[in-house]
Amino acid sequence: MIIQPRTRGFICLTAHPDGALQAVKNQIEYVKSKGAIKNGPKKVLVIGASTGFGLSSRITAAFGSDAATVGVFFEKPASEGKMGTAGWYNSAAFEKEAHEAGLYAKSINGDAFSDDIKKQTIELIKKDLGQVDLVVYSLASPRRTHPKTGVAHSSVLKPIGQAYTNKTVDFHTGVVSDVTIAPVENEEDIPNTVAVMGGEDWKFWMEDLKAAGVLADGVQTVAYSYIGPELTFPIYRNGTIGQAKNDLEATVTVLNDLLKDLNGKSYVSVNKALVTQSSSAIPVVPLYISLLYKVMKAKGTHEGTIEQIQRLFADRLYTENGEVPLDEAGRIRVDDWEMADDVQAEVDKLWKETTTENLSEISDIAGYRKEFFNLFGFEVDGIDYEKDANENVQVPSIE
Ligand code: NAD
Ligand code: NA
């Protein structure tokens, strides 16, 4: 079957297995080109391992440090005339490449928020690896069914207090317009968003893993956060999602206590704004990313998820002297190049000038679009999209 992209808003309904394989191979090649990560992790659990930062974390651990990896994600294989999801094809590609390289890689497909998937994961670690020395927590989800109460929480992306008006772009059409986002009115919206994207589930994972005895002495765990520029504060850092990120960051202290007797450490890494399935859903942010990419590419400081995570492992989590550089709030910062004063000053200036008419000239909207399609295996260089795709692709470790 010939597979073409089919989009609805910021969602792409189809995915291309051969493009996904090539994109995963490209990430692997990048990690290998950077050389071995000294003192890197050996047995790694990645929660949210199929796309975005989590997939890059799994690739970096495996191909930068020869690590055995267990990946947890929520994806769909192909079924009766329907394509599988991008994360399914990515994971099939990752396992294929890892196994060919002689690396252990197994995956668990299901709801990571549930007690059952935690239990299955622990059983797999016990059986195959004994213990893990790194746990990466990289879930991004619009909803979570709470495992203890059964309540289904939905997150919202809204400002708090007052409405927020700014520019936004429809990245398919290139039309720039003003958007006004009303503030939260339902008082449950904030706690619901915190329940989905805050730190409680990360804590539940670490508590269960510890209680089962599957965390190695000196274990590290890292989750991902975002801050960004002032212009997106009302919708991001000071909005509902920012409340969840505050909660996630506060969980570091709780986990450091939990892991103390294992000489373990917990971190939040603040990462750069990048095109992923999650970030394309946030208003205003895609326009900011398009301008940011333009400025950072011109300066030679642009990074994608794989460059970010390779740097996180090599220059932050696994440094030569074993010290992890942190900011004044105790966070790892690999958004440092994004937040550099000269970068932000240029983005600010371009932001004020941006219109539909000059968008393709002053922003990297073309790069944004290409990366968006790349997430789904489309527009990947070297793939012939007129050819029949390899449809029936399986993740080898999943029956
Ligand atoms: P993503 O959408 O690419 O990845 C989300 C992952 O979570 C996928 O592997 C998906 O399968 C998995 N997942 C979602 N719900 C699940 C469930 N119920 N059970 C099991 N797996 C589930 O997202 P991303 O952009 O890589 O985000 C990962 C983290 O990085 C998030 O905390 C996000 O806030 C953070 N972050 C993102 C950006 C950015 O610009 N994209 C920047 C900084 C930090
Ligand atoms: Na991820």
Image: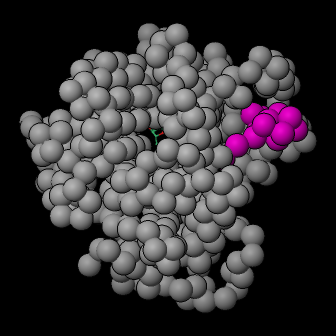
Whether residue 10 is visible to the viewer of this picture, yes or no, is no
| Quadrant the C terminus occupies | bottom left
Horizontal side of 213 relative to 218 (left or right) equals: left
Q: How is the image coloured?
A: one colour
Residue 295 occupies which quadrant of the picture?
A: top right
Q: Nearer the viewer, residue 382 or 60?
A: 60
Q: Which residues are magenta?
A: 291-304
Q: Residue at the spot x=36%, y=53% of the render?
A: 43
Q: Residue furthest front?
A: 321
Q: Nearer the viewer, residue 394 or 96?
A: 96
| Quadrant the N terminus occupies | bottom right
> Residue 379 appears at what percent x and percent y?
70, 67
Horizontal side of 324 relative to 132 (left or right) equals: right
The secondary structure that dominates the magenta segment is helix
Q: Residue furthest left?
A: 149
Q: Residue at the spot x=53%, y=70% of the render?
A: 15
> Residue 90 appears at what percent x and percent y?
49, 66
> Residue 199 appears at what percent x and percent y?
30, 29
Q: Nearer the viewer, residue 361 or 206?
A: 206
